Image: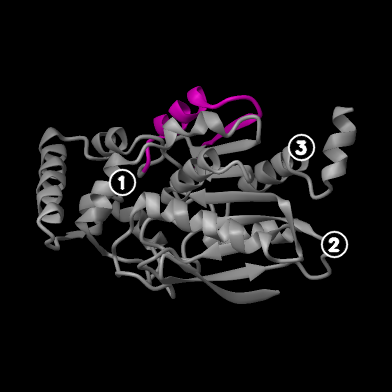
Amino acid sequence: MDERIQFDWDGIEIAGILDIPDGAKGPIPAFVVLHGFGANKDSGSVPAMAKLLTNRGYASLRLDMPGVGDSGGVVGRLVCLEQVAVARRGIDYLESRVEIDSGRIGVAGASFGAAVSIYTGGADERVAAVLSSGGWGNGARKAKLQHPPPEAYDKFITMVEEGRKKVAAGETMMVPRFDIVPIPERLRGNLDITSLMEFHVETAIGIFDFRPEDMVGKISPRPLLLLHPTNDSVTPVSETMELFSRAGENTDVHLLADVDHFLFSEDNIRVSHVIGDWLDKFFPLDAAAIKDAAE
């Protein structure tokens, strides 16, 4: 059952879709599902991730962040820390629903959404589980890896520095999508027609300064699943391995071969099996089951 919902965040109307599995009985666990860079609740990996969760009996709330999709805000202005705040408001919303087990709300996301999910999990003790697909931990390090030729990285840094001056002066500067996050031509077909292709420079600055790796260790002992393609041509796999090195107990990491950045868009059945096994072990529908097993 898809239900379109709205809530207010800092004067901006945030749009979302709450999906509660048909026939669900009693309060059930749920996930806030966060979209990738420039995507929205109806594009990219988000619908596939939400469907995977609801097919297994979990509720899902997929959100449009400010500036994309059906939410308000300045189009193309995507600020990482603001997205963390919106994700936390999503948790507030789920806590208000009688169908949801308010003590068992997780956060899930892919790519940009994965980084925001990890940061949110570390910042908010209410987050009961975190699922990250193709995420990253350090925006500055990621940017250097994503713009490998020295001249390309110099161009990126010059853009960020010029952007900081523009922002300080109260001016606007727009930046093409692939100047922020390059994507090989062969993978661009995974971008939905509604995906944004131009962004306020504040978006690039925010990504550069964002460091989910500083928060990942705070998630433990709550469960964390890190997924990443072994040969990711968008976000280097080394980012997830660095996150894993900083994470605590109850963290699983799975690297998948023969698949690129868009894990869910490529309909990889192994992904659903890995996530299903992880849910069954660390975040089962029946909370009593894991408690009984521990005793």
Position of residue 245 relative to residue 232, above or below, is above
Closer to the camera: disc 1 or disc 3?
1
Provide the secondary structure element on which disc 2 rests. loop
Provide the secondary structure element on which disc 3 rests. helix
**Distance in Å between CA atoms under marks 1 and 3:** 33 Å
The residue that mark 1 highlights is 207
Position of residue 45 relative to residue 283, above or below, is below
The residue that mark 2 highlights is 26
In the drawing, does residue 231 fall left or right of residue 168? right
Q: Quadrant of residue 150?
A: top left
Q: Quadrant of residue 146?
A: top left
Closer to the camera: disc 3 or disc 2?
2
Q: Residue at x 60, y 38 (%)?
A: 225
**Residue 69 pos. (x, y %):** 42, 72
State the extent of the magenta-drawn residues as a range: 235-258
Position of residue 192 relative to residue 241, above or below, is below
Q: Kindly identify the amino acid type of the residue bearing the numbered disc 3.
A: Lys
Q: Nearer the viewer, residue 3 or 110?
A: 3
Residue 243 falls within the magenta-colored stretch = yes
Q: Earlier in the sequence, mark 3 or mark 2?
A: 2
Q: Earlier in the sequence, mark 2 or mark 1?
A: 2
In the drawing, does residue 172 fall left or right of residue 239? left
Q: Quadrant of residue 199?
A: bottom left
**Residue 203 pos. (x, y %):** 27, 54
**Distance in Å between CA atoms under marks 2 and 1:** 39 Å
The residue that mark 3 highlights is 281
